[in-house]
Image: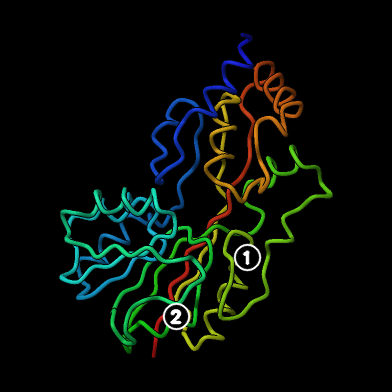
Amino acid sequence: MSRFEDLIAEGEAVPTEGWDFSWFNGRATEQRPSWGYAKLLAARMAEAEAALDIQTGGGEVLASVPVAPPVLAVTESWPPNVEISRRNLARFDATVVEVDDAADLPFPSDHFDLVVSRHPVVTRWDEVRRVLRPSGTYLSQQVGSGSVRELTEYLMGNHQQRASIRPPVGPLTTTAGVSPMAAAAGAEAAGLEVVDLRQEALRMEFYDIAAVVHFLRKVIWIVPDFTADAYRDRLAELHAFIERHGPFVAYSQRFLIEARKS
């Protein structure tokens, strides 16, 4: 097999469960936002009485906090991640509930003083407000519109943007394609007060085509219909570019939003 075929096979073989990105070490890099979400999360969790992490993935980020509140619950929609999060969060005795991303939250109203979410697929602002206690806080790092657009455009062409997955502002918003301003408007429409909003563009570098393939299989909204076979010709061109010129550079878009229930 050629080096290209070997790398394609390697990128296709890596499991996609959970949100552990350690496989990319030495193969791809991404700048981290200056606000340090994990550090903010740890500080808020140490002060909370009852907290909810929405769309936790495999619970990897939440599991990194030194101290968890007395009441801790998480939701996740993908069954393989549900089992991973149960293992990762077992030491906190967390309640792990399998819930569709767009569904109502299966918790009482006014139940949590802290709700968090890192890179949610969708945000149900109405449900966030409902489950928060008065003066409770929602803290979330989200994926902004146009994230990694350089890779999307390379594979799909400029005319095929992800506009089809950009929803209207309202009680339900999809953060895979929403701007910070639209997210803030969604929160305010649900009756929350936005107290912090920050955004950054972060440099990414892909050092081989296996990293590209695995990334696109794992982060499915970048090229929604991606398979290595469907995009093999473009992947071969990108492989040749990386071999000749060095890493492929793109920029992820991230924003931090904090909202409070009055």
Q: Which quarter of the figure has residue 250?
A: top right
Q: Which residue is rendered at x = 33% and y = 82% of the image?
A: 136
- 174 lies above or below 119: below
Q: Which residue is rendered at x = 32% and y = 61% of the image?
A: 40
Q: Which residue is rendered at x = 42% and y = 83% of the image?
A: 129
SS of the residue under disc 1? loop
Q: Which quarter of the figure has residue 235?
A: top right
Type of the residue with mark 1: Val
Q: Nearer the viewer, residue 229 or 223?
A: 229
Where is residue 228? Give x, y as percent. Answer: 65, 31
Q: Which residue carries the number 1 mark? A: 178
Q: Residue 127 got which mark?
A: 2
Foreground tag (2 vs 1): 2
Where is residue 125? Give x, y as percent. Answer: 49, 78
Q: Are marks 2 and 1 in contact (CB under 8 Å)?
A: no
SS of the residue under disc 2? helix
Where is residue 223? Give x, y as percent. Answer: 67, 45
Crowd band around label 2 with a 10 angstrom C-alpha radius: few (<14), some (14–19), many (20+): some
